Amino acid sequence: ETGVTQTPRHLVMGMTNKKSLKCEQHLGHNAMYWYKQSAKKPLELMFVYSLEERVENNSVPSRFSPECPNSSHLFLHLHTLQPEDSALYLCASSQVGVRDTEAFFGQGTRLTVV
Amino acid sequence: AQSVTQPDIHITVSEGASLELRCNYSYGATPYLFWYVQSPGQGLQLLLKYFSGDTLVQGIKGFEAEFKRSQSSFNLRKPSVHWSDAAEYFCAVGDTDTGRRALTFGSGTRLQVQP
């Protein structure tokens, strides 16, 4: 596999459920990101992990909980979500430091909260 | 705080016509600048990027963009649009602060191509 892979591609969950989104990058990058894309708002940064350390959470509600066990994997744990959390969640990776690269995005997980 | 403005929410052009999508940014230093394209239900694909050097950058699919510091702009152009170019286009500015490099996006421009 190459690039950035997100699973699942689609997810429907109830407000009382707990689920996790998974992202894996095969590019050898040292930074990973979660972005949220809603219908009526620009793409918003949620979390940044650089060198496996979270450097920003951007005031995201605590019902979203990220986890970055290593530089290749990133999770977004979801619990007690609200209908307004329905959106496309995009994962990205990049290389930061001496030789910067652009961000490479996964295909996204389309989340619907019912 | 950095910001990106894409003043055109929706643009329609005829196939074969030229295209220019506008992007203005606000950033305290020389930014990293990007254009991404998104087809329905898909992730973002990089069209081109500006990190430094030549202010006219070439990208994939025949796109180019010009960084104009005096105007804080990074407009995307294509001389002849193809029907397959119909998609949503996002301009983004990258934080050059080491260790972060997160992107701030504009609200996007949806391009329709008429036959």
Image (cartoon, coloured by chain):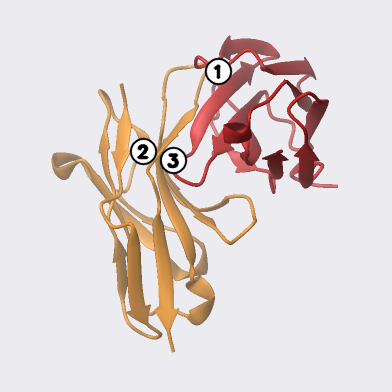
Chain colours: A red, B orange
The Cα atoms of the two marked residues, 3 and 2, are separated by 26 Å
Amino acid type at circle 3 is: Pro
The Cα atoms of the two marked residues, 2 and 1, are separated by 32 Å
Amino acid type at circle 1 is: Val
Depth check, front residue: B53 or B64: B64
> Left or right: A46 with respect to B26?
right
Q: Which residue is mark 1?
A: A60
Q: Chain of mark 3?
A: A
Helix, strand or loop for disc 1 = loop
Residue B104, x across and y down, in percent: 42, 33
Q: Residue at x 42, y 73 (%)?
A: B112
Is residue A94 at least partly visible in the picture?
Answer: no
- B36 shown above or below A38: below
**Could you confirm whether marks 3 and 2 are on the same chain?**
no
Q: Chain of mark 1?
A: A
Residue A42 disc label: 3
Residue B9, x across and y down, in percent: 33, 57
Q: Residue at x 29, y 30 (%)?
A: B30
Depth check, front residue: A77 or B14: A77
Amino acid type at circle 2 is: Ser
Contact (CB < 8 A) between labels 3 and 2?
Answer: no
- B112 shown above or below B72: below
Q: Which residue is mark 2?
A: B52
| Residue B64, quarter of the rendered image | bottom left
Residue B89, x across and y down, in percent: 44, 56
Residue B8 disc label: none
> Left or right: B41 with respect to B46?
right
Q: Residue at x 45, y 70 (%)?
A: B62
Helix, strand or loop for disc 3 = loop
Helix, strand or loop for disc 2 = loop
Residue A57, x across and y down, in percent: 56, 14
